[in-house]
Amino acid sequence: MVFEDGGAYCNRCEYTEESGSQALAAKPIRKLDTTEEFNEVPSLPITPLATRGIDQDVAEHYGIRTAFNTVTGEPTAHYYPFTVGGKVVSYKKRVLPKTFVNIGAPLKGVPVEFIGQSVCTGGGKKLLITEGQDDMLAACQILWRKYPNFTPAVVSMPHGANLNAFKDNAAFLDGFEEIIFCPDNDEAGQKLADDVSALVDRVKVMSITEKDANDMLLAGKEREFINAFFRAGVRTPEGFVTVEDVFDEATAMPQWGRPWPWPSLTALTYGRRDGEGMYIGAGAKIGKSEFVNQMAKHIVVDEGLPVALFKLEEKPAMTTRRIAGKIMHKQFHIPDGDFTQEELIAGVNRLRGKIHMYDSYKATSWDTLKVAIRHAVLVGGCRDIMIDPITRLTAGMDPSITNTELERFADEISAMAKDLGFFYYCFAHLKAPQNGKPHEEGGKVHSNQFTGSRAMMRACYYMLGIERDKTPDLPVEQRNMSSFVLLDDRAFGNAGRFDVFYHENGDYLEQEREFI
């Protein structure tokens, strides 16, 4: 370090250059190798760690030595002993303010003991483990001052988040009735607490309000730290619940979800519940779009709710026109349809503020789309999210990458639905049947024909197939009839099939048909 007055100082070897010197670059600098420095550490004094609030007797208890600037008298480094079998083999050198280096024998692959373990022999009732060495000193000091008649057993992890010390020193840990861990109060510390709890199932974890134990001491929160020490408990894994946690929900009478526009589907699924979702699969031009449009009309008109439509192969204006046609019972998308422009305008007006769409008549990424979904739910108030088709999210990707991306999509949208409270409808293309009729001729739909079916079957609540025979020789009434097949039902285990008829007025509903 070069100072404003021209002087200089080296943290590593303590070389000092007086101010005003003209020969800074020419002066030789004495450089200690780690072996030489290791041998010199025992000759350094043990003093209080003033900047950390650590007293003399605590530093002496752990053998923490301090190096000083011979010119200024300021401390430059602290040395914390690493031990193996109770013998010091190396030092963790803290070059102030906070640079760490190992001094002495290399420690890679060596079963190093906890820092402070050599002064905690004989076992006992409670062992406190901290994340850092200054936290060890602070915790010991707080407990020692409160209970001066006994020396508390407090150690530090030797290498930060490295868990090897717990495995290498299992016999030492077994000598204590209770093991208490004090992690740093930050994200990394809490992750470490989870890892330690998974490794040592009986460990109890403290919860503190400052960043670490040393900050608790410096903030004057010794009493609060002691309370946290005695209140430490076995960590409950994230997501772990008891009957008491879910009692009210578990004892509530089952409720029907929101109905579908098809009564048979409502009966099979007991309605739609926020946080769940369905994958719908059909061959090309079999009826997926009509499902979307009829469903959207039902949500907007019958339920009075907004709906988000991510139709990735259709322009928003056409989507609007088709749903308006469902409302007005007119085929607004057909040039020779039986309607007037006034009727068209009236139908579109009924959708103002009711449908939220996404203009992407091309490939789009899931990471982009999920931002739009979050907006539709949180800002637009939508409880229904429709994506048609999900294969657009992987357009142009290598097949191996496609499967991975669809698995990620399935997992993440399932989690989003639970977190934000919406029902999702994902429309998928189907793989061609390996045998039997093609889907365009009424071929059966099976779960494993869905693109990305493995991820869907694992993550979703329902899988629905749409079957239809479009053979030109069939009567128009039969060509306009579809069969909805509930293939998978994770919630209730139901399965079933029912017919839906496409009427010339645009309705796509269940109804009586004389030709059957």
Image (tube, helix red, strand yellow):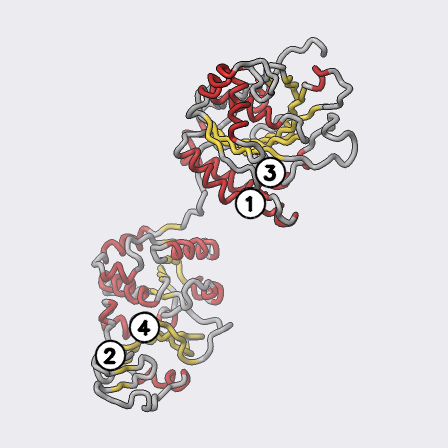
Amino acid, disc 3? Met
Q: Is residue 305 left or right of residue 456?
A: left
Could you tell me residue 198's position as x and y percent? 47, 54
Asked whether residue 461 is in view, the answer is no
Asked whether residue 298 is in view, the answer is yes
Among the two numbered marks 2 and 3 on one chain, the one whose residue lies closer to the N terminus: 2
Could you tell me residue 388's position as x and y percent? 57, 33
Task: Indicate which disc residue 169 carries.
Answer: none
Amino acid, disc 2? Phe
Vertical order, 328 against 436 (above or below): above
Among the two numbered marks 2 and 4 on one chain, the one whose residue lies closer to the N terminus: 2
**Mark 3 closeness class: few <14, some 14–19, many ≥20 residues within 10 Å:** many
Among the two numbered marks 1 and 2 on one chain, the one whose residue lies closer to the N terminus: 2
Work out how far the residue at label 2 is from the one at label 3, CA to CA, in angstroms.
65 Å
Among the two numbered marks 4 and 3 on one chain, the one whose residue lies closer to the N terminus: 4
Tell me the residue at 58%/38% (across/down).
390
Of residues 305 and 256, the one nearer the viewer is 305
Disc 1 target residue: 408
Question: Nearer the observer, disc 4 or disc 3?
Answer: 3
Amino acid, disc 1? Arg
Of residues 267 and 360, the one nearer the viewer is 360
Q: Work out which quarter of the rendered image holds the N terminus and state it.
A: bottom left
Disc 2 target residue: 3
- Which image quadrant is residue 127 in? bottom left
Disc 3 target residue: 456
Work out how far the residue at label 2 is from the one at label 4, CA to CA, in angstroms.
35 Å
Disc 4 target residue: 62
